[in-house]
Image (cartoon, rainbow, N blue to C red):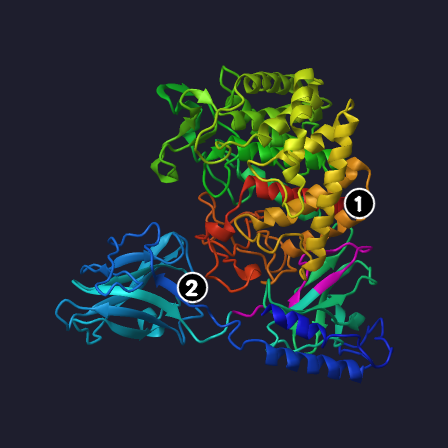
Amino acid sequence: MSIILSIISGCAGESGGSDESYTDSAAGDSSISQTVDNELAEKARTDREVLLQLIDAEYNTLQTITVLGKEKPDGNAISVLRPSEDQSDFPYITLSKSPSVIVLRGWTSTDLSLYVPNGYVSLEVKGTEGGESLEIGFEETRNKQSVSVTKIFDTEITSEWKSVTIPLAEIAGETDLSCARQFLVGGKGIQVRNITISAPDKEKSFPEFKVNQLGYKPDSEKRALVSGFPEKLAVYEGDAFELVDKSTGEAVFSGQLSMVSEFDEKYSGEQILCADFSDFGVEGSYYLRADGIGDSLSFEISESVYDELLKSTMRYYYYQRANEEITAEYGGKYTRSDVTPKDFEAPLSYDSDVKIDVSGGWYDAGDVGKYVSPGATAANTLLWTYLMFPDSFSDGQNNIPESGNGIPDILDEVRVELDFLLKMQDKSGGFYIKVKSKSENDDDGDRTVWVGDGDKCITNSTADCTAVLAFASKIFREHDSDYADTLLAAAERGWAYIEENPNIYTSTNYSGENNSSSAFWASACVYYATESESAHNWFLKNYDMFTGSLNSGTNCHNVGNMGIYGYYTYLLCENRDEEAVSEISRQFEGWKRSVLDRYKANPWSIAINEWSFWWGSFNMILGNAQEMYIGCSLLGLDKSDAEKVSQDAVNFITGVNAVRKCFITGMGEDPIKCTYSNIYYGDSPDGVPSGYMPGGVNSYDGGIISHFPLKCYYDSANDWVTNENAIYWNAVMVFNTALATSK
């Protein structure tokens, strides 16, 4: 459909007609007051008609889901696939009397509710003798409970392959299949192949008004988007919108909708318009209104509009604490006891007779594993947040047990993780990888300290811990010099281990693989904290090897690729090599331009590559903004573009997105209800505490949710693919929120 864009651009030229503008205030009149631009209105409608003629009418039809195709899906309880007798492309399975299980999307849930009314299951089936019965159904998972619905069909099965189509509504009965996880198929001696689910209906439409559900600062740019599938959108370029005072119901500002994208075929499949009310800055509660689409969700205009968001996204870490009772005094209704008490005496992976105390820290994500590299990455982001915006943080801000000790709560919370990292240091100076079940299964109750390669610690996990402990020692120095000394001593022992063991790797989750960017990051942090000549030499010898972290098209940092923070930390040092600084500056300028190009080209104003909507996409949207701002600050460059990219990233997360959700639990008028968590279950009565942000839209692992990347999201407690939280993802949200509060 890419040709459509060039054709439509010719239909979306300069608007003609009068220059008459809308009234800037419609107070006292709840109807939309406007001076109609007849030529613009007619042109907008004509352009939409042309667009609809060019677009494939099936562009947003529900996609066909392949349940059983050419290959056996991973993680299924079905028998081994056999090639069919006629050597066709589709292998088959031979069924037993009990239904076989075929998962639809890994072991996560899928919403099939839109398929039920008019959809159907299609498959090819063959009996041993003919006349057999076929059992088809689904298993749903709700509130951690599995419920199956199946139905037996007499389909006149013969001993030859036969195509069968069964209405989905007949299978589902009264079940809406909004939490379907498994496809069930049974029938003794029956063979089946080529199973699909399809429907002629359209994908789900979301409410047209997309606003930042928290709101906007009085002097800031204030933009909302209006979007929808072109054949359904009931407003046009040039139509009027109003800003309405929530307390009085009276319009206080009016304007015209402007065009953002005639047809966003890459990301949402929608036409996108903009409602800009930046000129209005009176504090209060408001919503937007436009004829044909009704009212938006409400929001605030206030200087303090992001204060609660900052607090909630920081308090997330209190709820993720390990080996600590969460009490009502600090956790409200989200109380719990220690989830993993065995952490106080956990065996080493290479010698189960040796047990150590590895209690404390944060649970990594939806699971209860504790991994040092993600923990170091998250702590690093929070420390940089405090370094860049110290005035945004205070003691007592988060209502945590440490509040009132004279130290900003954000540092108290980071210390929880740093104390855990200190416990993960081996006598050799190296650091262990993680604390988790030896089988990687949270449910078996086991807690093992994963050391690395036999009894040797991994270079990368050691380097990540070394880096953040050295960096933290500088920041904690003014608050607790004794603790800073402890952190620095551990970092120096870690650095000595890296110098002696620069290439120890293994195959495991998080920084086991060969990735020398961690040691590079550590060299900069150790030099920043100590002015160590050996660390400086390491940095200078290797800095030109990691320019890939600032290549055009590269996204921000991630666990296992922290090279960019090697550069940034070096820029904080007093005695720097100017040639190295010049090269860092040159590389950064090119990277910044590429991020801005992505941002400007994206109709949703997010800085991300169009192919990057995979696991943790929100980390990239927010992280690119974060790293642009830090780089501009350290190099003395104009920060206005970075501030704009960051603010629009915050807007996107808080509601200006294709599914009209605030992606932070408990925030805004229509927030997500949950994230995937083994600690707080989203389908329970209490749900998930406020402040949790998921990894986000995922068009790879979540591709069957929608044709369009920005809609590949499922607000389900079972969906870790799009909806799992993680400590390093939440940290970038804290950073960008702190930037928003500081402006």
Residue 147 shown in magenta: no
Query: Is any atom of residue 322 visible in this view?
Result: yes
Q: Is residue 67 left or right of residue 49?
A: left
What whole-number distance in Å separates the C-alpha atoms at marks 1 and 2? 45 Å
Query: Is any atom of residue 392 visible in this view?
Result: no
Mark 2 Cα shell of 10 Å, populated few (<14), some (14-19), many (≥20): some
Q: Is residue 274 left or right of residue 58?
A: right
Task: Please give the residue where the numbered disc 1 appears in the rendered image.
Answer: 639
Q: Amino acid at mark 1?
A: Lys
Mark earlier in primary sequence (1, 2): 2
Towards the viewer: 706 or 545: 545
Task: Please give the residue where the numbered disc 2 appears in the rendered image.
Answer: 178
Q: Which residues are magenta?
A: 204-224
Residue visible at 63% across and 32% down in the picture: 545
Q: Amino acid at mark 2?
A: Ser
Q: Residue furthest right?
A: 19
| Image position of 484 with respect to 460: above or below | above
Residue visible at 68% across and 38% down in the picture: 397
| Residue 342: x %, y % from top left | 40, 28
Of helix, strand and loop, which mostly describes the magenta segment? loop
